[in-house]
Image (cartoon, grey):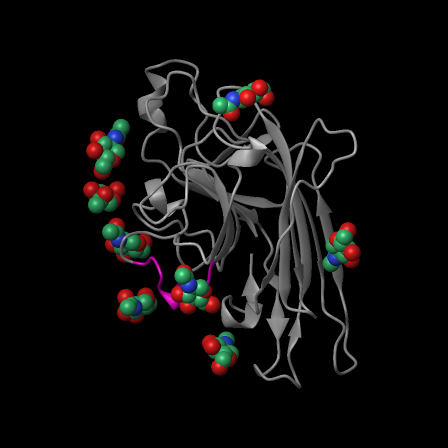
Amino acid sequence: MGMAANPITAVVLLLLSILAAPPPVSAKLKTTTISFNTFTFSDPLKVNPPATISNDALQVTPDTGNTAAASSLLANQSGRILFDTPFQLWEGKNDTFSDRVASFNASFLVNIFRLKDSPTPGEGLTFVVAPDLNLPLNSSGEYLGLTNATTDGNASNQILAVELDTFQEDFDPDANHVGLNINSVRSNKTTSLTPLLVGPNQTANFFNVWVQYDGVKKVIYGPFISAFTSPCRKMLWTNLWSLNLIQCVHGRAV
Ligand SMILES: *[C@@H]1O[C@H](CO)[C@@H](O)[C@H](O)[C@H]1NC(C)=O
Ligand SMILES: *[C@@H]1O[C@H](CO)[C@@H](O)[C@H](O)[C@H]1NC(C)=O
Ligand SMILES: *[C@@H]1O[C@H](CO)[C@@H](O)[C@H](O)[C@H]1NC(C)=O
Ligand SMILES: *[C@@H]1O[C@H](CO)[C@@H](O)[C@H](O)[C@H]1NC(C)=O
Ligand SMILES: *[C@@H]1O[C@H](CO)[C@@H](O)[C@H](O)[C@H]1NC(C)=O
Ligand SMILES: *[C@@H]1O[C@H](CO)[C@@H](O)[C@H](O)[C@H]1NC(C)=O
Ligand SMILES: *[C@@H]1O[C@H](CO)[C@@H](O)[C@H](O)[C@H]1NC(C)=O
Ligand SMILES: *[C@@H]1O[C@H](CO)[C@@H](O)[C@H](O)[C@H]1NC(C)=O
């Protein structure tokens, strides 16, 4: 699990907890909790350049946008940062008797905004569950560091992502939405964030994002989003989407 993205200034702090589902048969359960206050290269993360860790934050694409000229450096980039240890997300024989599917919670703080001098906004940022750190060639732009023109939609990708999408492609509902993506940048579900003003703006905007997966009920909750500055961290909106991890990701993934 980790982050994948296409150019956008992104500052991410991540908290994750994984819990194997209560088993139908007695078996070992393990809970892993990983939390980060600020990020450094000594954290248990794998970073695929041009992604980097800088200013205490994960920067999935370079953050060089302080001058107009820098906007060209930001173009056509994608990157990926994952945990360095894979998790067992499910096991069993893909039947209702033997299946055990892990639950997980991830929450992160994101700073997402459009640079003043940037002619085009970045495409977005995702929270991703993927088999490996490999970034497909030409996965910038609409491909969000997840897929490319050849691999998009192929079930062998084994990718599950929650996108924060800030650019409208012809298959997108708008230029500021959240989506659930399975093996493709064409989302299975989307919800507009425009009413919440989460998206592109020329001011730094911090938001908390939560993604929760319940391996027993096989539903993904959220993402939930709240303004960082909100003292009560009110959930602005919630969603509940049915999703069986067995049908979309490898048993072991990061
Ligand atoms: C995820 O968070 C929810 C709400 O805080 C909690 O009820 C649930 O037990 C958590 N699950 C895990 C696997 O930590
Ligand atoms: C980015 O890619 C597009 C389309 O392939 C190309 O037209 C453009 O020149 C590229 N920009 C940079 C800065 O490489
Ligand atoms: C997509 O990625 C795969 C794997 O990296 C690569 O073999 C393929 O050529 C890429 N397709 C394009 C259009 O770049
Ligand atoms: C794909 O990536 C390769 C290697 O970076 C590059 O030479 C090629 O032009 C890219 N193709 C497209 C369609 O962007
Ligand atoms: C999907 O990817 C697999 C593995 O790379 C490949 O063998 C297969 O041909 C691809 N399917 C399609 C429809 O492109
Ligand atoms: C939604 O997800 C499934 C995989 O469970 C996939 O086969 C399907 O193509 C997706 N639908 C859309 C509209 O992307
Ligand atoms: C940009 O952010 C400011 C401060 O949060 C807000 O007042 C303004 O409405 C936002 N503008 C747009 C276009 O989202
Ligand atoms: C599990 O079974 C479902 C339904 O038959 C199938 O779509 C899915 O690909 C299977 N998953 C694995 C990992 O075999």
Q: Quadrant of residue 71?
A: top left
Q: Residue at x 63, y 33 (%)?
A: 207
From the top left corner, tell me how far across and down residue 27 is, in percent. Answer: 77, 78
Above or below, 168 against 151 in this view is above
Look at the image and tell me whether residue 186 can be seen: yes
Residue 154 covered by magenta stretch = yes
User: Could you tell me which residue is drawn at 74 percent across and 35 percent down?
Assistant: 233
Q: Is 204 situated left or right of 34 in this image?
A: left
Direction from residue 232 to residue 191 in the image, left or right:
left
Q: Is residue 144 above or below residue 93?
A: above
The percent position of residue 14, horizontal first and vertical second, equals: 65, 41
- Residue 154 left/right relative to 111: left
Q: Is residue 155 above or below residue 203?
A: below
Question: Which x, y percent locates residue 100?
Answer: 67, 75
**For residue 213, which quarter of the picture?**
bottom right
Q: How many marks?
A: 0
Residue 219, percent across and down? 63, 64
User: Is residue 80 located in the magenta-colored stretch of the structure?
Assistant: no
Give the position of the C terminus as an image quadrant: bottom right
Q: Nearer the viewer, residue 88 or 204?
A: 204
The quarter of the image that holds ligand 7 is top right
Farthest front residue in view: 195
Q: Which secondary structure is most common in the magenta stretch?
A: loop
Range of the magenta residues?
Answer: 151-159
